[in-house]
Image (cartoon, helix red, strand yellow):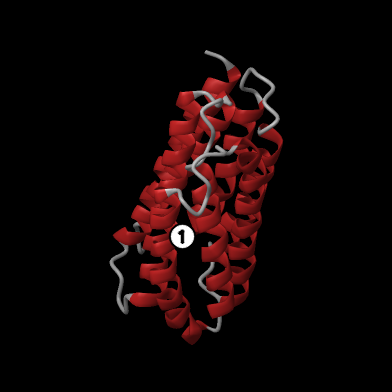
């Protein structure tokens, strides 16, 4: 088994453990996540770095994973300042993903005429103002609004990779980006909309988030 394969297996195991811990309301489970969650992105980044190949997309994707580590650590807390730091980290990560995907975009159809881009823009225009409005009570409405724009831009770019890119890589990256969107939608619902959210929602957030990062990393390794 290659080092990259071993590291991928370690990441999957860490993701499973952290997801299970995230669903528990026991204080010891939350404390354990201070070990499991910060290990996620370094392990995934190591697996990408040791995957054979030399695609230029790897550097910005590795930067996105480093920014994701900041996000992971920040969102271990429900307080305002760590949330802002964590969300900013993820926004920087999406900018790094954009740096990897935009140069590999398809030229036709154009962005304005692309039906998938239109659907994603409509989803953003419908949901972002509502989520930002709900987030005003926590004093983070501008952060949430800006982050949602960065996330949607990344998803649009990830679903517009050109036909000159390997089909498997395109499918993995698009699936990962859409799963990322689903994960953050659940997170926003849990944090800002529901008054008494089920603890299992955090498990759904982590399962989709860790899956999204893995899919994008796998796709980047095949570009």
Helix, strand or loop at label 1? It is helix
Q: Is residue 59 left or right of residue 116?
A: right
User: Outermost residue toward the bottom?
Assistant: 137
Kindly tell me whether residue 22 is visible in this rendering.
Answer: no
Q: How many marks?
A: 1
Residue 1 in picture, x, y percent from top left = 52, 13
> What residue lies at 49% left-to-right and 53% top-to-bottom?
32
Please provide percent x and percent y for residue 134: 42, 81
Q: Which residue is mark 1?
A: 30
User: Where's residue 60, x and y in %?
Assistant: 69, 41
Residue visible at 58% across and 27% down in the picture: 221
For residue 126, above or below residue 104: below
Classify mark 1: residues with Cα within 10 Å, few (<14), some (14-19) or many (20+). some
What residue do we see at 60% from left, 63% from top? 86
**Corner quadrant of residue 56:** top right
Q: Nearer the viewer, residue 86 or 98?
A: 98
Can residue 72 be seen here? yes
- Residue 92 vs residue 165: left or right? right
Figure quadrant of residue 71:
bottom right
């Amino acid at each position: 088994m290659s080092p990259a394969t071993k590291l991928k297996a370690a990441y999957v195991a860490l993701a499973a453990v952290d997801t299970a811990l995230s669903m528990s309301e026991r204080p010891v489970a939350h404390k354990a996540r201070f070990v499991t969650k910060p290990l996620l992105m370094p392990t995934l980044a190591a697996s990408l770095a040791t995957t054979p190949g030399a695609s230029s997309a790897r550097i910005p994707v590795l930067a996105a994973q480093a920014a994701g580590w900041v996000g992971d650590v920040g969102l271990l807390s429900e307080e305002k300042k760590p949330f802002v730091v964590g969300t900013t980290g993820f926004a920087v990560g999406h900018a790094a993903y954009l740096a990897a995907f935009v140069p590999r975009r398809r030229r036709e159809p154009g962005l304005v005429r692309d039906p998938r881009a239109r659907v994603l823009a409509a989803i953003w225009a419908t949901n972002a103002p509502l989520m930002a409005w709900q987030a005003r009570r926590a004093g983070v409405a501008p952060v949430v609004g800006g982050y949602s724009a960065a996330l949607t831009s990344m998803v649009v770019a990830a679903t517009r990779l050109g036909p000159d890119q390997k089909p498997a890589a395109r499918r993995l990256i698009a699936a990962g980006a859409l799963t990322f969107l689903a994960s953050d939608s659940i997170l926003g619902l849990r944090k800002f909309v529901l008054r008494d959210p089920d603890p299992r929602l955090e498990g759904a957030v982590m399962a989709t988030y860790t899956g999204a990062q893995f899919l994008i990393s796998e796709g980047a390794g095949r570009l």
